[in-house]
Amino acid sequence: MHTGPARAVGTPLTALALVVAVFALVLGGAGAAFAHAGLSGSDPADGAVLKAAPQYVTLTFTESVSFSEDSLRVLSPQNERVNPRPARHVDGKDNTARVELSGKLPQGTYTVAWRVVSADGHPISGAFVFSNGKPSETAAVVATGSPDDTAVGRLYGVFRYVAYSGLALLVGAAAFVLVCWPAAATIRPVRRLLALGWVALTASTVALLLLRGPYETAGQLTSAFDPAQLGRTLTGRPGGALAVRLVLLVAAAVSLRWPARRTTDRTGLGGRLRWAGALFASALAVTWAAAEHASAGIQVALAVPVAVLHLLAMGVWLGGLITLLLLLRRRGSDGQEIPASAIGRFSALAFGAVAVLVATGVYQSWRQVGSWEALSTTSYGKTLLVKIAAVVLVLCAASFSRRWTARLGHQASQATATATLVPAVSAPERVRVAQGVGAPTPAAGQELGGAAEAPAADEPGDTAEAPRFEADAYRRGLRRMVTAEAVLGVVVLVITTVLTGTQPSRAAGEKAAVASAAEPQAQVVTVPFDMGTANHQGTVQITLTPGRVGENTVEAVVYTPDGGLATVPELRLSLTQDALGIGPLDARLKNLKGYWAAYDLRLPMPGVWTLNITVRTTDIDQVTVRDTVRITSLPG
């Protein structure tokens, strides 16, 4: 292994430009994908008014989902549940959910409330209504807001932060010991850092495993200790991944009770420990990748190993930085300091980890975002932009850290070379010689024929302290830059954790597209009428946009029998809903020289509305015709 100082990066902007170019390439050619599931359709449809009560309610999602006994509830107008049995998949299709309704349902409006878990482990929820026979007022109460905006959801998010932090400390500190400086395993602060990482990751895993059940079902915090709910959690993929992670951590604690001195053996057990540590860290990372965003969507076979590499690189870099900072700030009583060669090895290791982070991050960004527009129009994209800015700052801090490392390594090399070139002064050899009678007595401490005493190395004016002063200055500079880099790394870690809980831009775009395709963009009705002349049958075309509850735009055009535009003195439109006794609502159409329009027609209820159209063809002749149009509810 190379033990010399790492060479400073001379052109960091070149690497950054390459990253931007690759980023543009992959984002420019992105296709469609899913991550969080979305509701793509339902039977009965949202806002439907049925002549007969349905036997089932069926939901179809954009990807596979899992659910519990209360995931799908159908509530009567009196807020009573009318599906006695839990939901099931339809014909083995994992992206469906169906419940059977009880016997005879009275007329009125029913509410369907659902909450399922998508393939990437995140719960999603929603609600819609349908009417049996005729619409009515409903007292059904449905929870609103984000599935994560609950006490359990917020607590679950906190422990996810703790879990990522524990992984970074454990993997980074272990990598530093096994790769950069094995002797650090005997230093108490480093051993405490390893223990802290293990405890944080183990405790957060236990908490996440207990909270997973109420997090998925929007249950109370006290239900976290329900054995039945814990059993259901363990059968799901997210819960199973957490259980495997806990087993790995316990097994590691049991198997690594070896004497710390054995880790300093660079040729024997140390080599095997490095391989065992790499396998253990990879297995831990898989428990994340197999149950989150990487496990759903396109290219899962590639996305999972990429996510594993991304997590490992994050841990090696950030946890290693914290370990290095701890050692740089250490002033032990034994005077032992981290050698420049170890700092150089970590500099090379960190550079490789950051390169892996950037490469895997570019791929994950392409996979989850999909387009340049999504970067500025979705929550995931905006959060990702903040992360990119933080990563750029990290790269700048890292380049300065490598420069300080190179200076420290260069100074250490010079000191070593100087020590090699200056030979050590040996003690003068005592030689027995004959002494003539009357010869002068040698001075005390001096033998005749002995060498002259060499000058002391620590006389005033010696320059031995200069290299030491420079080394201390370089270490202080490196310590400051490593501190800045570590702080920025923690920021990146926090943003990464936020991203894992945010709906990816691709999924948001696909969900909006599905909803848009499922909802009518406009309702168009064409009604024939008698123009008052023999064999002259005209038509009037009414367009309501968007054809939903709330404010609508109305445009009306009159056509002659041959399809040409007809000019009429007056055109009136009113709407009624006979089932509820609503109306007539006057559209107050205005003549806009060629067509008639109104831009503020408000419809208060979904369902079938009757259009009453009065066309005056002359000063004394007019005709009234009728037709119906279905108005849907607001998108949920």
Image (cartoon, rainbow, N blue to C red):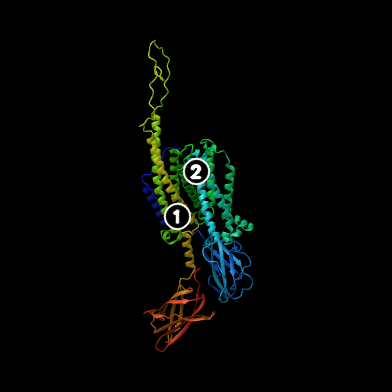
Q: How far is mark 2 from mark 1, CA to CA?
A: 27 Å
Does residue 268 lie above or below 47 as drawn? above
**Residue at the (58%, 44%) spot, across then down:** 253
Does residue 182 lie above or below 40 as drawn? above
User: Does residue 606 appear to the left or right of 53 in the view shown?
Assistant: left
Mark 1 residue element: helix
Q: Which mark is residue 296?
A: none
Q: Which mark is residue 175?
A: 2
Sooner in the amino-acid sequence: mark 2 or mark 1: 2
Does residue 201 lie above or below 63 as drawn? above
Marks 2 and 1 close (CB-CB < 8 Å): no
Amino acid bearing label 2: Ala
| 2 or 1: mark nearer the eye | 2
Tell me residue 540's x, y (percent): 43, 80
Residue under label 1, please give it: 365
The residue nearer to you, when weighing 539 against 259, is: 259
Q: In this orientation, does residue 184 appear? A: yes
Mark 2 residue element: helix
Residue 223 placement: quadrant: bottom right
The residue nearer to you, when weighing 299 against 575, is: 575
Does residue 442 lie above or below 517 as drawn? above
Amino acid bearing label 1: Ser
The residue nearer to you, when weighing 423 against 532, is: 423
Q: Residues within 10 Å of mark 1 (few under 14, many from 20)?
A: many
Residue 382 placement: quadrant: bottom left
Q: Residue furthest left?
A: 461
User: Does residue 472 appear to the left or right of 64 in the view shown?
Assistant: left
Tell me residue 90's x, y (percent): 59, 63
